[in-house]
Image (spheres, rainbow, N blue to C red):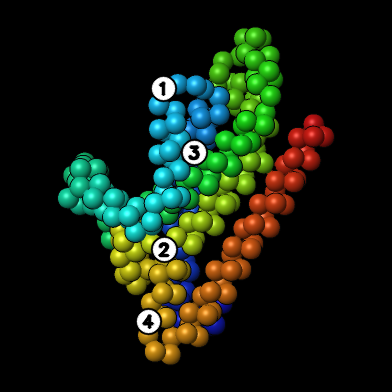
Amino acid sequence: MADWLTPAQWDAVALSLKVSFWATVLSLPLGVAIAYVLARYEFWGKQALNGLVHLPLILPPVVTGYLLLIGFGRRGPIGGFLEQTFGLVLAFRWTGAALAAAVMAFPLMVRAIRLAIEAVDPKLEQAAATLGASRIRVFVSVTLPLILPGVIAGTILAFAKAMGEFGATITFVSNIPGETQTLPSAIYSFLQVPGGESQAAQLVLIAVAIALAALVLSEWIGRRVAQRIAGA
């Protein structure tokens, strides 16, 4: 692949994999927690929380990127705090690209996990609780094994979505080669240059291959886990 792609193309692919990996891994614990809360609890503001989680799906990605820039930019309230306290800069950095990708992929992850939790009979959890198990132990020993296929599916779908994120990313962190230029941004850049269509086409093939591989892997792992749980 290194011989087939130019250094700029390879950097874009590698950066996209890096961004998508961290976006998925860091958002997974929060995704599981919010999905569980939405699936198992009734409380004031539940619909507001559900709407907030799914808001990136219906907002134009550029709007999401702009809101991230306002909040997490160096002059934003959260971005300024992170820089002054931890030295962490998000705007116009690959870390910001990971944040934008995580925000855009988060609704897909939460939805897949929430559907898996809602499919689990609450009586199984109640039975474990009556035996003296704490809520955390019930979740780890009963709920989590049963929803594992959904967690895996949501994780892989979120990774694939993060790989394809463009609008929010380019608005929040721009399109800096070697720093924030992800796979979709690189495709867009090549299409703006005369004669760049062939390089863009190469990256499109890679993007399609990664997306298909993610879907196939999600189905395969989900089925294997489901078969193991059924046979347990």
- Secondary element under disc 3, as helix, strand or loop, is helix
Q: Which residue is mark 1?
A: 44
> Disc 3 versus disc 4: distance between alpha carbons?
37 Å
Query: Viewer-nearest of labels 3 and 2?
Result: 2
Q: From the viewer's perspective, is residue 7 above or below residue 144?
A: below
- Toward which corner of the image does residue 62 lie, by quadrant? bottom left
Name the disc covering residue 192, or none.
Answer: 4
Mark number, residue 166: 2
Q: Which numbered marker is on residue 31? A: 3
Given the image, on which type of amino acid does mark 4 rest? Answer: Gln
In this view, the residue farthest toward the right is 231
Nearer mark to the viewer, of 2 and 1: 1
**Dot 2 lies on which element?**
loop
Closer-to-camera residue (44/92): 44
Give how far apart the Cα atoms at labels 2 and 1 are: 35 Å
Q: What's the residue at 57%, 35% (across, down)?
A: 114
Q: Earlier in the sequence, mark 3 or mark 2?
A: 3
Mark seen at residue 122: none
Tag 2 near tag 1, CB within 8 Å: no
Q: Give the mark nearer the N terminus: 2 vs 4.
A: 2
User: Comparing marks 3 and 4, which lies closer to the viewer?
Assistant: 4
Label whose residue precedes the other's in the sequence (3 or 4): 3
In this view of the protein, can residue 89 be seen by the observer? no
Location of the C terminus (image quadrant) = top right
Q: Amino acid at mark 1?
A: Trp
How far apart are the two marked residues, 3 and 1, measured between alpha carbons? Answer: 20 Å
Q: Earlier in the sequence, mark 4 or mark 1?
A: 1
